[in-house]
Amino acid sequence: MTAYRTRLKQFSEVLGTDVVDMDKLRKLCFSGCPCESGYRSISWKLLLNYLPLKKNEWDSWKEKQRALYSQFVHEMIVKPGSTVNNKNNADVTMEDHPLNPNPDSEWGAYFKDNEMLVQIDKDCRRLCPDLFFFQRPTEYPCEEMVNASNKVETLRKRVEQCVLQSETVSRNWLGITNMMSSRKKAHEEYSVLSEGEEAHWEVVERILFIYAKLNPGLGYIQGMNEILGPIYYTFVNDPDVDCRRCAEADSFFCFTNLMSEIRDNFNKTMDDSDFGIGSMMKQLMQMLKEKDPACARKLEEQELKPQYYAFRYLTLLLSQEFPLPDVLRIWDSLLSDEKRFQFLITMCCAMLILLRSDILKDDFPTNMKLLQVSHFFFNFLFQKCFR
Amino acid sequence: MAKKTYDLLFKLLLIGDSGVGKTCLLFRFSDDAFNTTFISTIGIDFKIKTVELGGKKIKLQIWDTAGQERFHTITTSYYRGAMGIMLVYDITNGKTFDNISKWLRNIDEHANEDVEKMILGNKCDMDDKRQVSKDRGDSIAREHSIPFLETSAKANINVERAFMDLAQAILNKTPSKDSEPRGIDVHKQEGSSRKCSPSPPHPCLAALSALAWQPYSIGWPLFGQLQQHLPTACPLTPFPWMDYLLLVLFIGSALAAVAAAALARLPSSPPPHPHARAAGDGHICCQ
Ligand SMILES: Nc1nc2c(ncn2[C@@H]2O[C@H](COP(=O)(O)OP(=O)(O)OP(=O)(O)O)[C@@H](O)[C@H]2O)c(=O)[nH]1
Ligand SMILES: [Mg+2]
């Protein structure tokens, strides 16, 4: 216990100075951030270059960024949401209309966005399904959303609308009229929440939607939700009210910064370059070859390629391989790695070596399962280390 | 040495747009359960199920791929080894059906020519939300002479049948003589794993165990120092001479192969590989 207190004291010292010493902070975080007093949130914000090092600049900076985020929400969700509605009522002979084949057509963009939104929606609904957290209502819903007038098409309405639109088509094909029943159904899916509430996963959805809109070259790629999840979870569960209230905006910027470092992993055109996921997998296999040639040879012999398992480890920064509390602990170390993400590769290599005695004796399918079964992995490693 | 518990090994692949229910179908088949809370597949997943068909124990190795476009470069590399491909769309989503032809083209480009295919229209329990009529599914399947079924992972409709039909189609093409199975030669595969008999715990494991692992507290001495704890080399076998023996055997057989090829002066038709032959004969179109 005294060691733990010393630790807390060290954190309060490093974070208490006027200008944060990043080297010291990195060293401390590497062996784990306590969540007490919001040390983890603050540390991550610093490690992800969101907060400036000078402490007296924090408040004004945060204010500025949060205002910027509100603006994004307004411009990318609220405003288009209201114009679309106006358009619905407008005369179809207008210049731009839903069937406009022109790629620059606002409607074209709108439909494309909807496709992306439906995908984000699907993935966010099932974010960390073993944890109830993301299904719970947030303490601080976005005012502009829950108080939005009927005229504004919020993301929630937009997803519902997409489902309905597709059903109108189905009615034409089959001659079945079922629009009323489905509207009720779509509504029921949110029914656990009362009026004016938003679930945490909806907040995550909004952040991802805005990110994807701001990064049209990349858009939304599955797995991004799993990168955002741990950040958002940490900020929402902070003891500090200010941190909790602005978790959405802060997570957005931290996520954006983190993505700027790992976006190549999500970009399929980078797969074979020196920066994409392909090269990371190569580095991992290279390291394994050096550290444990027999294990590497065995995997090669069985043609158990890193794409089968390490692709996910590396792309998602291990967030799918361990239960969330462990992911947070692992990320303390990953984020304090100065040569991000060299440590990630080392860690993955260590995971393989820990499993070596099984890898060496088992056949391909057994090994495949061993390396793929997420979540059980951790307990398994845990037992191994203490045996 | 593990006892052989099956006669044939078939490799199957599940493809289709994201969200059509590939993972759910596979879970229904392998664990006979339905779970609405699967996270989207990133990259590729893998399941095994052993079934009995025509008096044979068949081990199905089923690969479940991610549907989103981004993962295609990663997933198309599995097409080559697949003997059966399950192409899934969602009957409540017209777009996933429209993409069927795109997936078929993918198969043509990347899979073996004689791969068995099957089209599944999933989520047929949601008839009230249907967008793709059964006739449309039927006709595209007929057009390409591919078997077709409507399934539901949720209501457990036709799932078992779909996988069994596909396995049966592959089995039908397999020569009946036991000595020439079309599936991966089980004996050969297990033979190769014999080299690595149970090994003593690796020294680096001991090194890691020495470090206390305390994920929830703050003192988690990390893999950071791992590199120092790792030995630089680990021999393949307990004794160096065995390594040499393996090496000599390997080089010997390689030399023999080269010599044989040279003697035959590149014969016009090299002796067919068992797989290759099975692939060539009896191309059965199952309808
Ligand atoms: N009603 C119904 N829903 C289903 C059925 N099969 C799957 N679903 C739902 O469809 C959603 C997607 O299912 P998955 O199996 O994860 O989809 P997938 O094809 O594996 O998607 P990716 O991994 O992203 O490529 C889940 O929310 C399931 O609950 C079905 O037979 N009936
Ligand atoms: Mg899946």
Image (tube, coloured by chain):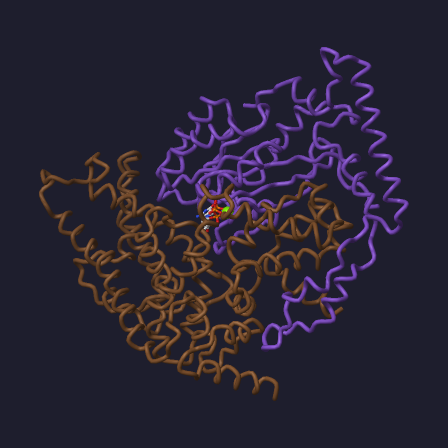
Quadrant placement of the N terminus of chain A: bottom right
A64 lies above or below A92: below
Q: Colour of chain A?
A: brown
Lateral position of residue B248 relative to residue A339, left or right: right
Instruction: Residue at 47%, 78% (x, y): give it.
Output: A39
Residue that appears at 63% across and 44% down: A305
Task: Place residue B211 in its image quadrant.
Answer: bottom right
Name the residue nearer the viewer: B274 or A306. Answer: A306
Q: Residue A187: percent from the left, percent from the top?
A: 31, 58
Residue A243 drawn at (x, y percent): 37, 76
Question: Which residue occupies 67% across, 28% down?
Answer: B171
Q: Is residue A269 visible?
A: yes
Drawn side of residue B37 relative to residue B275, left or right: left
Mark yes or no: residue B124 visible: no
- Side of A16 relative to A354 (left or right): left
What hue represents chain B? purple
Q: Nearer the viewer, residue B226 or B170?
A: B226
Q: Is residue B110 above or below residue B70?
A: above
Residue A104: image x %, image y %? 21, 40
